[in-house]
Image: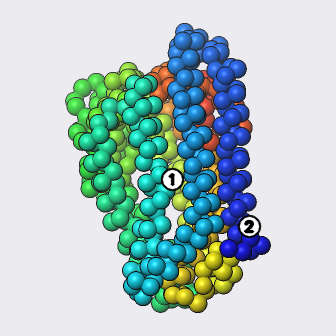
């Protein structure tokens, strides 16, 4: 390990920056919550009371004090695995066993993931079966949890293995343009998954049934006719089988595009409120938020892959972390992608500032669309308040905390905007 190597310096700086900034932000949030967490804003008087806010604070505090040791363990794992030479040992072992580029990389990815995966199991179990159950959210059984984990692993393997093999093949056979070909394959798989997800993947975990005939379906169809939106169907999902958290979303592409309502959402909101929530989601479609994001994201993906293609040719990338640049070089180029992830991954929070700001702007725009389609912002406001209460979410987090961590505006900002107070 060469501590003067620029990539090692970036890894260490990013790792400690990420650890420090997140602990600072969480501490700021906790301190603010401790001081102001039970104060009822005037806009929410009659909707929430201090007792409900005490529950919110207790839930958020439980997650915070759980997060602290988990994040410390994550930091320790990251440092130990890199500084001990674990990844170098795994690569050398895999190459010596197989001397095959593809098998070496598959073994490297699998073996490298074991320590963090195993060490996180107790934390994941505690979060699900202690915290979530204590606050009345989790309906998960150990059987369902294990089956879900197996299914998620298998689905991940079916997606990740072809991508990994494609990357290795392109790197080995197209030295100059591998990043372009891999980017095209990556996008094709991503779009393909979006198309098949509602039909093949989602039903592995939940049961989806068409929304029953009645007032809710009729009003949703009126909304679709008014907005000109077309979908393959409206479905309810048995989310309550696992959790009492609620949500609604659009999924799929083309003829497989559908709307999914959590059964918990339908039970918690009135018909007008559900329609307002769906109108918000339609607002994302009508304002082409997904398309606009893709227009920005796709070129960034190719630019990032091009930069990776340049950097993985640099021997100092491997030597800095203790790898022999001459050993299994064809396979080592893929490992270079992994090492670049280590080097720059700690600075993700910087990119999230831009991403979150863009996302919050889109949410405000979709909220306004819902208000316009429903003729009033009241149904959406009351829906947001109910969902916030049911999910025990913070109402007014510190501004700096929401800037870094919230892809959606905090509740109070949203209802003020919906009611026209910030227009």
Q: Nearer the viewer, residue 194 or 115?
A: 115
In the displayed structure, 141 sits above or below 287; it is above
Q: Quadrant of the N terminus?
A: bottom right
Q: Which residue is mark 2?
A: 9
- Mark nearest the camera among 2 and 1 is 2
Which residue is painted at 60% across and 25% down in the image? 395
In the displayed structure, 55 sits above or below 292; it is above
In the rendered image, residue 184, in percent from the top left (x then y), is placed at 47, 74
Q: Nearer the viewer, residue 26 or 361?
A: 26
In the rendered image, residue 227, in percent from the top left (x then y), is placed at 42, 39
Q: Is residue 356 left or right of residue 56?
A: right
Asked if one can make out residue 376 in the rendered structure from this viewpoint, the answer is no
In the displayed structure, 99 sits above or below 48; it is below
Number of marks present in the image shown? 2
In the rendered image, residue 102, in percent from the top left (x then y), is placed at 40, 81
Cβ atoms at labels 2 and 1 below 8 Å apart: no
Q: Secondary structure at mark 1?
A: helix
- Mark 2 vs 1, N-terminal side: 2
Which residue is painted at 58% across and 28% down in the image? 61
Q: Which residue is mark 1?
A: 290
């Amino acid at each position: 390990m060469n501590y003067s190597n620029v990539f090692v310096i970036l890894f260490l700086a990013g790792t400690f920056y990420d650890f420090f900034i997140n602990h600072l932000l969480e501490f700021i949030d906790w301190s603010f919550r401790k001081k102001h967490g039970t104060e009822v804003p005037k806009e929410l008087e009659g909707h929430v009371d201090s007792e409900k806010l005490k529950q919110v604070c207790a839930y958020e505090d439980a997650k915070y004090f759980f997060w602290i040791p988990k994040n410390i363990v994550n930091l320790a794992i990251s440092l130990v695995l890199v500084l001990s030479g674990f990844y170098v040992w795994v690569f050398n072992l895999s190459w010596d066993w197989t001397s095959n580029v593809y098998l070496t990389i598959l073994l490297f990815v699998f073996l490298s993931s074991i320590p963090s995966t195993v060490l996180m199991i107790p934390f994941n179990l505690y979060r699900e079966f202690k915290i979530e159950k204590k606050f009345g959210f989790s309906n998960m059984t150990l059987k369902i949890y294990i089956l879900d984990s197996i299914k998620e692993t298998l689905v991940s393997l079916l997606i990740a293995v072809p991508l990994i093999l494609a990357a290795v093949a392109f790197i080995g056979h197209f030295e100059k343009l591998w990043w372009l070909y891999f980017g095209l394959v990556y996008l094709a798989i991503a779009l393909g998954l979006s198309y098949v997800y509602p039909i093949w993947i989602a039903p592995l975990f939940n049961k989806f049934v068409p929304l029953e005939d009645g007032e809710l379906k009729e009003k949703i169809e009126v909304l679709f006719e008014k907005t000109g939106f077309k979908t393959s169907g409206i479905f309810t999902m048995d989310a309550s089988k696992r959790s009492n958290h609620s949500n609604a979303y659009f999924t799929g592409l083309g003829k497989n595009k559908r709307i999914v309502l959590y059964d918990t959402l339908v039970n918690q909101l009135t018909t007008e409120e559900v329609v307002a929530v769906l109108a918000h989601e339609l607002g994302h479609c009508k304002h082409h938020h997904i398309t606009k994001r893709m227009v920005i994201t796709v070129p960034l993906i190719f630019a990032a892959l091009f930069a990776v293609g340049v950097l993985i040719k640099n021997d100092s990338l491997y030597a800095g972390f203790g790898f022999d640049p001459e050993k299994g070089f064809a396979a080592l180029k893929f490992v270079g992608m992994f090492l670049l992830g280590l080097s720059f991954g700690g600075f993700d929070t910087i990119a999230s500032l831009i991403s979150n700001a863009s996302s919050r702007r889109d949410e405000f725009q979709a909220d306004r669309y819902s208000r316009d389609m429903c003729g009033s912002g009241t149904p959406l406001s009351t829906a947001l308040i109910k969902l916030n209460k049911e999910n025990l979410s913070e109402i007014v987090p510190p501004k700096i905390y929401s800037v870094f961590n919230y892809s959606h505006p905090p509740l109070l900002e949203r209802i003020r905007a919906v009611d026209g107070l910030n227009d």
